[in-house]
Amino acid sequence: MKQLSTRTIALIALVAVAVLAIGVFAIQDHTKTPTPGVENGEGQENQGESVEEKGENQDPGYDFSKDLDVSTWKTYESEKVGVRITYPEDWEVVVLENEKAGFALRSPEYSPIPIQSGKFYYDGEIYIDDISNPKNLSIEELFQTFDDLSGVWFSKYDYEEVGVGKWKAVYFPELREIHRENYYVSTNRKLYSFGYKYSESRKNPDVSRILRKIVENFEPLE
C-alpha cells in the first residue's frame, strides 16, 4: 500500500481542524440566549423611542407651584411705574431698557426659547407697566384712544371685569396673536398693566396664579 507523504498528512489535518472549529462555532451560536427585541435592529429603535418619550415627559426643571407661598415673597417699589409689588423670593426684578416700558419679573427658569424665525418665547416672565390716564377715562374708553393694535382689543378679544382682592380689573385671559394674558387696573389717573407672555402651547397655570397674586397685592405709590 502506498504510504501518504508528510505534506498530504499535514493538509488533511489542517482541513480536519478547520471543519471542527466551524462546527463548534455553529453550536455556540445556536445555543446562545437571544436579547429580546434586538434582532433586525428592533432593540435599537425601541430604546431610542423610550429615551425620546422620557425626554418629552420630563419636568422642565423648575417647580413654579412652590412660588405660590406668598409668605416668602419679597417687596419691590418702582418709582418709574409708581407701584409697590410683592413677588416670589427667587425671581429677579429687571428694569426694562425702553424708557416707556416698566419692569419685568423673571423666574429662575427664564430663558429665550426660539419658537419661529426671529421670535422667542420666554418662560416665567411677568411684565408690569403703567399708562397715563389724565382724563380718568374708563379702561375701554382709554384703549379706544390708542393708535396701535390694542385699540381694538375690546372688540376683538374676550375679556372679563373681575375683582382681584380689593381691585376691580379688566382681565384678558388670552390675547391670542401675541400670546399674552393681561390684567388692567385703573386708579389715581393711571392704568396699571400686569401681563404674562407665553407660547401658544406652553401657558403655565402656576405662572398665571402668580400673576393674579401680584395684582391682588399691589399698591400704587402715593
Image (tube, rainbow, N blue to C red):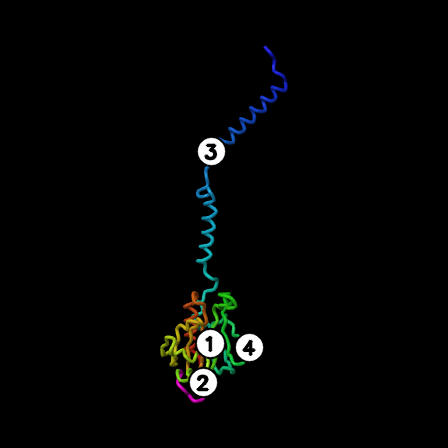
In this orientation, which residue lies closer to the viewer: 100 or 67? 100
Q: What amino acid type is highlighted by mark number 4?
A: Glu
Q: Residue at x 43, y 89 (%)?
A: 135
Q: For marks 1 and 3, give the CA distance.
A: 71 Å
Find residue 122 and name its label.
Answer: none
Majority secondary structure of the magenta segment? loop
Label located before the other in sequence (1 or 3): 3
Residue with the mark numbered 3: 30
Q: In what element is the residue under mark 3? A: helix
Q: Earlier in the sequence, mark 1 or mark 2?
A: 1
Magenta includes 68? no
Please give the residue where the numbered disc 4 appears in the rendered image: 97
Q: CA distance from mark 1 to mark 2?
A: 20 Å
Task: Categorize mark 1 by other alpha carbons within 10 Å: few (<14), some (14-19), many (20+).
Answer: many
Residue 86 — which label? 1
What kind of residue is marked 1?
Answer: Thr
The quadrant in which the N terminus is found is top right
| 1 or 2: mark nearer the eye | 2
SS for dot 1: strand
For mark 2, what is the residue?
190
Q: Secondary structure at mark 2?
A: strand
Q: CA distance from mark 1 to mark 4?
A: 22 Å
User: Quick one: label 3, few (<14), some, or many (20+) residues within 10 Å?
Assistant: few
Q: Position of residue 110 (x, y in %)?
A: 50, 68
